[in-house]
Image (tube, helix red, strand yellow):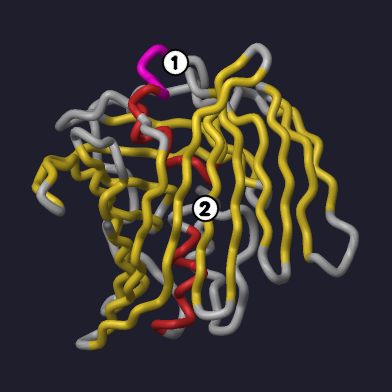
Amino acid sequence: MHRFRMSSVRAGRAWRGPASLLAIATWCAPVVGGHAQVAPPASPPAASAPAPLVLPGDSTVRGSRIAAGTVRYALTAYRDADEIPVGRLADEIRIDTVPGAVLLRRVQRLQRGTMELIDSTRTDFATLAPRWHRSLQATRRAVLEFGGRRVKGSVGPNDVPPVPIDTTLPVPVFDSGNWDLLVRALPLEKGFTARFPVYDPDAGLREYHVAVTGSTTVQGEEAYVVLFTLGKGRESVVWIGKQSHDLLQMETMLGPTALLRQVRVR
């Protein structure tokens, strides 16, 4: 999941950086027009103590909660009384064994009209520690390699030499583009909260927050309702299936009267 550039998106401007499900909201913002802004509340729910910090290797994270397969989503924007189809997303996950490790291999293909974004990652199956991330789109590319606290790679437009990345962080991190995999791998229940560090090639070290606010039925499946917070004014509501652990639906406010909805399709 990647940095959600809510305040800097303008019509006609391509999304920048590795793909993520929240980046879809930024990429599709020109469809509903104007600046994409998330409505209040603008911060994680108040709590008597900070949410527990989850790091790669934490015993609460179980990659076995994530099933292999391909899930497809429809993306629809709602503005005032208008319903606007804006794109399709195919999310493919495979579990592969390589010498010394079991990996989750993920490919996301985001299609909107003639534009396509392809995002590929490799993640440790047991811990969800990131290994590798590659993002390709018409105007920009990024390649990242993760090794604990060290991140190397490059990012930049396709028509000029990329900007190199080589940084050592104070803590090991997750991949910002795979935030949803981590959420699906956590022991969700009502009242559950967590925060976790991620690396974003544009913003560096970030901390994301999740809070399970309740449950409901979505597409005939019982689902947890999860409030996902990237930072002040940057939130989405996510529905995670209790049995499948799939991301069933996500909603992000793009403005006072504009909403982006991502829904699993069969």
Disc with the residue nearer the chain's start (2 vs 1): 1
Judge whether residue 25 is colored magenta.
no
Q: Main secondary structure of the magenta part?
A: loop
Which residues fall within the magenta stretch? Answer: 58-63
The residue that disc 2 covers is 108
Q: Position of residue 32 (x, y in %)?
A: 39, 82
Name the spot of residue 186 as percent of width and height, x first.
33, 26
| Residue plotted at (52% across, 31% down) | 104
Q: Position of residue 87 (x, y in %)?
A: 43, 72
Q: Quadrant of the C terminus?
A: bottom left
Q: Nearer the viewer, mark 2 or mark 1?
A: 2
Residue type, mark 1 in image: Asp
In the picture of the structure, the residue carrying the numbered disc 1 is 58
Residue shown at 66% from the left, 65% from the top? 137
Q: Please indicate whether residue 41 sits to the left or right of residue 145 in the image.
A: left
Q: Nearer the viewer, residue 197 or 224?
A: 224
